[in-house]
């Protein structure tokens, strides 16, 4: 499956999390040519239907406590469907440091600081799908991760300078 096939609607991006953020992302990503479906965020105990999805996009969930979200994400990591597709988790800067300590390293699980520009999010989506389906070399994905890490550090520094 190629990125062209994905962006032409032959495959689907699945979005789970906050309904407002999810609906906004649906509109933005559809305008870029993606087929997108929103998965119901609650109840947490019900398995997600990811059939036909090429990527799972997780949005922030302010309605859940950090503990509830982490428990859900841990159970999601052990689901057979999420092992077969890449997962892109949008993380609020304030939550990033709390969650990072308990998160396990997984090559199919990726993180992007939230909020971010839609162009950067689209870049991540294309890179992850391309890499997952063998059209992008791992070194290119690592370059994107390095940029993301540097950008995150700059964002944190700006926040500290503003509020401290």
Image (cartoon, rainbow, N blue to C red):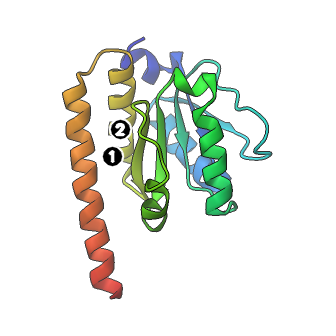
Residues 33 and 68: in front is 68
- Residue 18 visible? The answer is no
Residue 157, given in percent of the width and then of the height, sits at 26, 73
Which image quadrant: the N terminus? Answer: top left
Identified at 71% across, 46% down, the residue is 41
| Number of the label disc, if any, that sits on residue 124 | 2
Q: In the displayed structure, would residue 7 be above or below residue 25? A: above
Residue 26, given in percent of the width and then of the height, sits at 57, 41
Asked if the residue under mark 2 is in contact with the one under mark 1, i.e. CB atoms within 8 Å, the reply is yes
Q: In the displayed structure, would residue 95 be above or below residue 83? A: below
- Residue 92 visible? The answer is yes
Q: For residue 6, what is the image quadrant?
A: top left
Q: Is residue 116 left or right of residue 65?
A: left
Residues 108 and 37: in front is 108
Tag 1's secondary structure?
helix
Q: In the displayed structure, would residue 163 be above or below residue 86? A: below
Q: Is residue 54 left or right of residue 145?
A: right
Identified at 65% across, 49% down, the residue is 71
Residue 159, given in percent of the width and then of the height, sits at 33, 76
Q: What whole-number distance in Å separates the C-alpha atoms at marks 1 and 2?
A: 6 Å
**Residue lying furthest bottom:** 164
| Number of the label disc, if any, that sits on residue 15 | none
Which image quadrant: the C terminus? Answer: bottom left
Identified at 53% across, 39% down, the residue is 57
- Label 2 neighbour load within 10 Å: few <14, some 14-19, many 20+: many
Count numbered badges in the picture: 2
Q: In the displayed structure, would residue 164 be above or below residue 76? A: below
- Label 1 neighbour load within 10 Å: few <14, some 14-19, many 20+: few
Residue 58, given in percent of the width and then of the height, sits at 55, 44
| Number of the label disc, if any, that sits on residue 120 | 1
Tag 2's secondary structure?
helix
């Amino acid at each position: 499956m190629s990125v062209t096939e994905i962006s032409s609607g032959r495959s689907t991006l699945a979005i789970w999390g906050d309904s407002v953020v999810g609906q906004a992302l649906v509109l933005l990503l559809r305008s870029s040519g993606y087929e997108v479906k929103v998965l119901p965020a609650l109840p947490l105990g019900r398995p997600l239907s990811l059939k036909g999805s090429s990527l799972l996009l997780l949005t922030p969930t302010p309605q859940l406590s950090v503990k509830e979200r982490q428990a859900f994400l841990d159970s999601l990591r052990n689901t057979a469907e999420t092992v077969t597709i890449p997962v892109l988790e949008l993380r609020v800067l304030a939550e990033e440091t709390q969650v990072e300590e308990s998160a396990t390293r997984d090559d199919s699980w990726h993180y992007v600081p939230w909020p971010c520009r839609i162009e950067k999010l689209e870049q991540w989506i294309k890179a992850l799908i391309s890499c997952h389906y063998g059209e992008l070399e791992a070194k290119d994905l690592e370059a994107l991760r390095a940029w993301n890490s540097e950008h995150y550090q700059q964002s944190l520094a700006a926040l500290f300078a503003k509020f401290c």
